[in-house]
Image (cartoon, grey):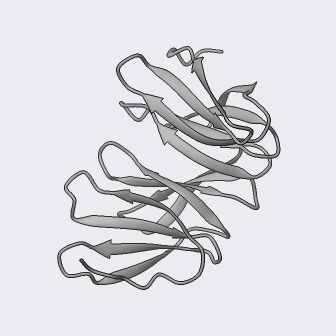
Amino acid sequence: MKTIKIGAYPRGITISNDSQYAFVAQMGGSVVHKINLVSFEKELLNVGSNPRALVLSPDNAYLYATLNAAGRVIAFDLSTNKVVKSVKTGSAARSLDISADGSALYVVNYTSDTLVKVRGSDFKILQKIKACNRPIGVTYEKLEKRVWVACYGGSIKSLMIPQHNSF
């Protein structure tokens, strides 16, 4: 076992496909910790205020993060260490997930009560629907191509989201 100090309010965590790096959001600040899982060396990535949830693109080129207070999702280019895309999805962006091919991001907004589908290539909002009262979690089910949303009140919902990108 290994303990790695992160700081206050660690939230989202994701691991690269090759299991070489872990990325951990520090919601109380503006950084994501990039941790080498062999040497345990850390690098700080400045992504914006209050990062909460994280996912990687299927090719590990981009790190996507929700910025909770700003209600935004960002794309962070891991080769240049810069934020390259950003979009406002609603109020209190919480969790996110990505489609199997990386073409879409699914984001839940806690106080907007919405699920938002964002096109990965240009960050255009393709769909915004009322999910439930205070959606808190989301996952993309690869086999059935469904999106599941966890609602703070104690339920989950399965939502079929069209896979084509013309709305």
Point 56% across, 44% down: residue: 96
Query: Residue 152, percent across and down?
Result: 71, 42
Q: 85 or 13, which lies in front?
A: 13
Left or right: residue 71 versus residue 12 is right
Q: The C terminus appears in which quarter of the rendering?
A: top right
Taking the image as shown, residue 100 lies to the left or right of residue 66, namely: left
Asked if 96 appears above or below 71 in the picture, the reply is above
**Hey, which quadrant is residue 31 in on the image?**
bottom right
Q: In the image, residue 99 lies at what x, y percent?
A: 43, 31
Q: Residue at x 82, y 41 (%)?
A: 112
Left or right, 77 with respect to 40, comes to: right
| Quarter of the figure with the N terminus | bottom left
**On screen, 101 above or below 146?**
below
| Above or below, 29 relative to 157 | below
Which residue shows up at 63% across the image and 68% down it? 48
Q: Position of residue 133 (x, y in %)?
A: 80, 35
The location of residue 30, given as percent across then percent down, is 61, 75
Number of on-image labels: 0
Could one spot residue 122 in this view of the protein?
Answer: no
